[in-house]
Amino acid sequence: MTTWSLGFSSGPYQVSTSEVPDVSEHMSFLEMLDVLNESLIAKGEDPVAFDHDCREGICGMCGFMMNGKAHGGLPRTTVCQLHMRHFKNGSELYLEPWRAKAFPLVKDLAANRGALDRVIAAGGFITAPTGSAPEANAVPVGKVDSDMAMDAAACIGCGACVAACPNAAAALFTGAKIFHLGQLPQGQPERDRRALAMVQQLKLEHFGNCTSIGECLAACPKEIQMEVIVRMNHDYLKAWVRERS
Ligand code: SF4
Ligand code: FES
């Protein structure tokens, strides 16, 4: 069992620290925060706010910076998949929420990522009749296309790409959504409208512009590739020209 020192920074000049005793190396990082919060509540203090849900790397709810690295910096790993053994025993860890104009701070480590939901609502869907599901194999999809669509669909909407980007752009996230639907036959009817609407929504939500720095790629726990941004730009430009011709 080890005592850990945690620093929390919710604003440029606000840093608080907490000691968490009796932490086992087998605890997950979020279990360690649970222990901290139980002790804070027992003392009549406010617990540290942080988002989480599945704790299995699936839902995209967790996420904050650890010592300046999104999700702690371990490849292919979300915050909820980290364990205390991934860190040097008893070292100091500084935790910060995602910082971006489009992600207003809620409290402590929790930022409001509703802007990503609104980008999806703008066009990240297909139109399909409901009530009578079509036969799954009625529309054949090639193996290469389905694999590429699945790779892009792995995006969990965590927002790490935005937090890591010096421009606070959401190009990797939006590109992943546009790519995965645009790669499938079912996604073709709305392909132009989707690209125009989702890119327009990025502007309305005050995300920055992508300048191909690539920090998002290093931060993404699902290894979404730059190719999705290229496709987004391609689809947007093509749709923009079509709309005007
Ligand atoms: S692209 Fe990666 S980092 Fe960005 S929201 Fe999706 S999973 Fe998270
Ligand atoms: S809590 Fe669901 S991905 Fe981390």
Image: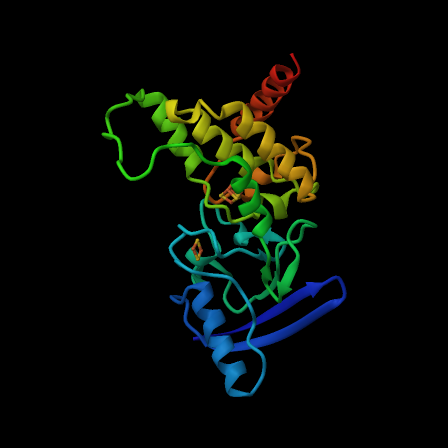
Q: Name the one closer to the observer, 127 or 150.
A: 127
Toward the bottom, the furthest residue is: 43
Residue 85 placement, left or right of 237: left
Can you tell which quarter of the image residue 185 is in?
top left
Residue 235 appears in the figure: yes
* 214, above or below 35, in the image: above
Whole-percent x, y for residue 162 in the image = 61, 44
Q: Name the one closer to the observer, 149 or 57.
A: 149
* 118, above or below 17, in the image: above
Q: Quadrant of ligand 2?
A: bottom left
Whole-percent x, y for residue 123 in the image = 52, 35
Q: Residue at x 66, y 44 (%)?
A: 205
Q: Quadrant of the C terminus?
A: top right
Whole-percent x, y for residue 29 in the image = 46, 64
Q: Residue at x 44, y 33 (%)?
A: 152
Can you tell which quarter of the image residue 149 is in?
top left
Residue 97 placement, left or right of 62: right
Whole-percent x, y for residue 221 in the image = 48, 45
Residue 229 appears in the figure: no
* 190, above or below 65, in the image: above
Residue 119 placement, left or right of 56: right
Q: Name the one closer to the observer, 184 or 122.
A: 122
Q: Name the one closer to the observer, 61 or 235.
A: 235
Q: Quadrant of the N terminus?
A: bottom left
